[in-house]
Image: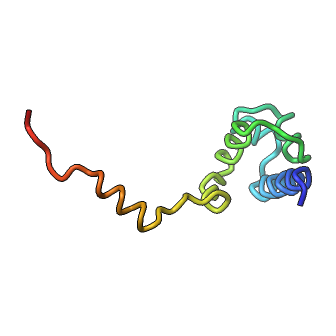
Amino acid sequence: MSDPAILVQLGARIKDYRIQLGMKQSDLAQLSCVGVNTIYKIEKGKPVSTSLLVSILRSMSLLENIETLVPETQLTPMQMLKLQEKKPKRVRNN
């Protein structure tokens, strides 16, 4: 899927969710502290800044789902062992 197609799909999903919440574009814009034009652009699949998108997702209580989009990296057992080796074993008074 191309980047523009992904933006269009993301915008459509945000629009559908906004409507499901019973919100007008102006309601979401005010809640997100962005302009109505920004909501319009996102819903039409136009590019906007990441910070604006985050603000809108937060306002719609969708930011918790970021874990699904970009999961945290998991440490391998070897990386965990190396981190444990670097931890101080005791505290000394100077």
- Residue 30 lies, in percent from the top left, at 73, 35
Image quarter of residue 70:
bottom right
The vertical placement of 65 against 24, above or below, is: below
Pick out the residue farthest to the left.
Answer: 93
Q: Quadrant of the N terminus?
A: bottom right
Identified at 14% across, 44% down, the residue is 91
Front one among 4 and 46: 4
Left or right: residue 27 compared with residue 75? right
Left or right: residue 31 compared with residue 16? left
Front one among 93 and 25: 93
Identified at 22% across, 49% down, the residue is 88
Left or right: residue 36 compared with residue 90? right
- Residue 92 lies, in percent from the top left, at 10, 41
Front one among 7 and 28: 7
Image quarter of residue 59:
top right
The vertical placement of 3 against 30, above or below, is: below
Left or right: residue 86 compared with residue 32? left
- Total residue callouts: 0
Identified at 68% across, 40% down, the residue is 55
- Residue 63 lies, in percent from the top left, at 63, 51
- Residue 49 lies, in percent from the top left, at 76, 36
